[in-house]
């Protein structure tokens, strides 16, 4: 390393700094400010920040937002810090729809506006426009946050309005929305189908589409973010003798699904996608009966070989898994009203 140029050495060191230290380093001099603002620096710093030790839990309680680190060696949370919302909002107004590389896609319940927000840097960007783009209706719309091959962060917005489906893509690079075609079965337009938020994995956004009654149809819709083509694949072969919920997670760029079935006493299996087919990884121990309303607020993540089933009130279950531990199990990006997220701290900006 002694023969490397000073610029290269500084670049390598700074890309390994925590996100908040990068922000402070911008004030050192004009050269550092310019360097730390380049897209190359942001991209490399982000790739080195997406590690389990950099995970944070964000919880929203009425008007207050708390961020807490995850202490992986004892499976607990560290001390909380308060984050001030940088945008105007009302009581119990902010809901998290999706997340990627430190960016959160949120909507405001009183205005229906979509925003991109980095809670680490506090930067945000409103996605709403005068021509009615960027407005989200809960239980009808679906959102997916992704980055394409050109390193452009984008938002896919699937809108269902009175039996008419529209699909729109927002580009951070050009700061605008555009319509794209979507061919699917007409029945998926019905409000009887519940769409998840999109989970980004391996260049594809995945959505679960589940019919809201026992024995209903359940499928996975895939969106290739580079070709912008949609296709449908089957759901894991789970029993249909109860309510079915599929929660998608990205583990080291491999798609997994927690598939739960039942009414009050739930059966949960973990599946992984290989090609277009699902392979069962494990079945969890029996879950004690819990109310269905509480179950719908649960999210999951795994670290150190343990699986946590977490609600907005804190951890509900810890399940020991007899398998090779994952380095980090990133959170689900669909919360169904759960006011929180597990995210990584980065300097990725919601706008260019």
Image (cartoon, helix red, strand yellow):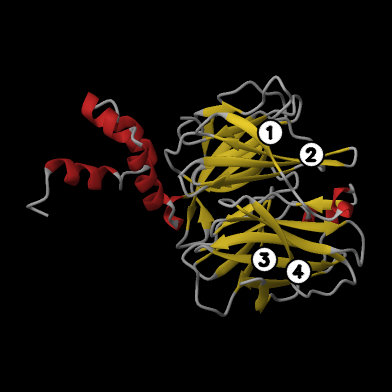
Q: Secondary structure at mark 3?
A: strand
What number is the disc on residue 234?
A: 4
- Looking at the image, which residue is at 45% across and 57% down? 52
- Looking at the image, which residue is at 67% across and 78% down? 280
Q: Nearer the viewer, residue 102 or 144?
A: 144
Q: Nearer the viewer, residue 178 or 286?
A: 178
Tally of numbered tags: 4
State if disc 4 and disc 3 touch (CB < 8 Å): no
Residue at numbered disc 1: 107
Q: From the top left corner, tell me how far across and down residue 310 is, in percent.
A: 66, 56
Sequence-first disc among 1 and 3 = 1
What number is the disc on residue 138?
A: 2
State if disc 1 and disc 2 touch (CB < 8 Å): yes
Residue at numbered disc 3: 257
Report the Cα–Cα distance between label 3 and label 4: 12 Å
Crowdedness near tag 2: few (<14), some (14–19) or many (≥20) residues, C-alpha within 10 Å: few
162 shown above or below 203 = above
Crowdedness near tag 3: few (<14), some (14–19) or many (≥20) residues, C-alpha within 10 Å: many
Is residue 72 visible in the rendered structure shown here?
yes
What is the quadrant of residue 231 in the picture?
Answer: bottom right
Q: From the top left corner, tell me how far across and down residue 76 is, in percent.
A: 53, 56
Sequence-first disc among 2 and 1 = 1
């Amino acid at each position: 390393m002694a023969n490397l140029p000073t610029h290269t050495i500084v670049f390598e060191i700074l890309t390994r700094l925590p996100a908040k230290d990068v922000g402070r380093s911008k004030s050192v001099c004009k050269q550092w400010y310019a360097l730390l603002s380049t897209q190359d620096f942001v991209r490399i710093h982000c790739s080195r920040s997406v590690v389990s030790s950099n995970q944070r839990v964000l919880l929203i309680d009425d008007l207050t937002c708390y961020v807490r680190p995850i202490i992986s060696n004892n499976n607990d949370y560290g001390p909380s810090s308060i984050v001030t919302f940088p945008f105007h909002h009302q009581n119990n107004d902010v809901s998290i729809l999706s997340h990627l590389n430190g960016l959160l896609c949120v909507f405001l319940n009183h205005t229906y506006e979509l925003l991109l927000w980095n809670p680490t840097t506090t930067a945000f960007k409103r996605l709403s426009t005068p021509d009615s783009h960027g407005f989200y209706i809960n239980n009808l719309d679906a959102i997916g946050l992704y980055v394409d091959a050109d390193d452009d962060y984008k938002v896919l917005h699937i809108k269902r309005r009175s039996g008419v489906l529209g699909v729109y893509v927002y580009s951070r690079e050009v700061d605008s929305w555009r319509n794209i075609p979507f061919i699917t079965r007409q029945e998926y337009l019905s409000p009887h189908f519940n769409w998840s938020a999109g989970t980004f994995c391996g260049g594809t956004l995945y959505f679960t589409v589940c019919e809201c009654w026992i024995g209903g149809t359940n499928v996975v819709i895939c969106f290739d973010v580079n070709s912008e083509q949609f296709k449908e694949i089957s759901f894991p072969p789970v029993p249909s003798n109860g309510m079915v919920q599929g929660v998608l997670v990205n583990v080291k760029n491999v798609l997994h699904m927690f598939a739960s079935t039942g009414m009050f006493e739930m059966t949960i299996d973990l599946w992984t996608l290989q090609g277009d087919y699902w392979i069962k990884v494990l079945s969890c121990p029996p879950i004690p009966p819990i109310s269905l309303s509480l179950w719908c607020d649960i999210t999951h993540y795994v670290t150190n070989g343990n699986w946590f089933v977490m609600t907005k009130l804190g951890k509900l279950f810890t399940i020991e898994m007899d398998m090779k531990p994952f380095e980090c199990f990133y959170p689900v990006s669909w919360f169904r009203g759960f006011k929180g997220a597990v995210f990584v701290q980065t300097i990725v900006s919601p706008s260019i």
